[in-house]
Image (cartoon, rainbow, N blue to C red):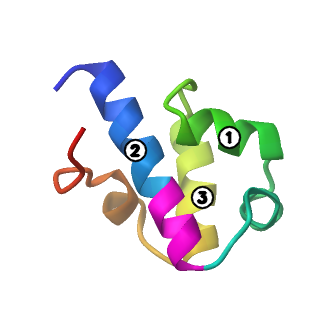
Amino acid sequence: MTKMDFDKKLGIKIKLLRIKQNFSQEKLADLAGLNKNSIGLIERGKSNPTTQTLKKIAIAFGIELEQLMDVTKIKL
């Protein structure tokens, strides 16, 4: 899997988790201590988030970082 494919799959997974938990991009950004625009870029696969940023997102979702990063079930 290329880095671009991983970023796209990760973005899709974050968006699906956000919708499942009924979070707006604003709410996820607030819970993770991030900017709403950053969430949008990550969801579209247009950003290269740091491990620290991904940890914040995982905490906001109440899951482990490893769970967030597992994109094996996401199809492009």
Question: Which label's residue is closer to the chain start, 2 or 1?
Answer: 2
Q: At which x and y percent is residue 32?
A: 72, 60
> Please, what is the three-letter code of the amino acid marked with disc 2?
Leu
> Please, what is the three-letter code of the amino acid marked with disc 1?
Gly
Picture quadrant where residue 5 is located = top left
Q: Is residue 71 left or right of residue 35?
A: left
- Residue drawn where x is 80% and y is 56% of the image: 33
Q: Main secondary structure of the magenta part?
A: helix
- From the image, tell me which residue sits under label 2: 10
Secondary structure found at label 1 = helix
- Vertical arrangement, residue 40 with respect to residue 55, above or below: above
Q: Tell me where the magenta segment starts and ends, as one range.
A: 15-21
- Residue drawn where x is 48% and y is 67% of the image: 17
Instruction: For the residues labelled 2 and 1, say whether their Cβ atoms are less than 8 Å apart.
Output: no
Residue 16 among magenta residues:
yes
- From the image, tell me which residue sits under label 1: 40
Instruction: For the residues labelled 2 and 3, say whether their Cβ atoms are less than 8 Å apart.
Output: no
- 3D distance between C-alphas at marks 2 and 1: 12 Å
- From the image, tell me which residue sits under label 3: 57
Residue 18 among magenta residues:
yes
- Vertical arrangement, residue 56 with respect to residue 11, above or below: below
Instruction: For the residues labelled 3 and 1, say whether their Cβ atoms are less than 8 Å apart.
Output: no
Give the foreground label among 2 and 3: 2
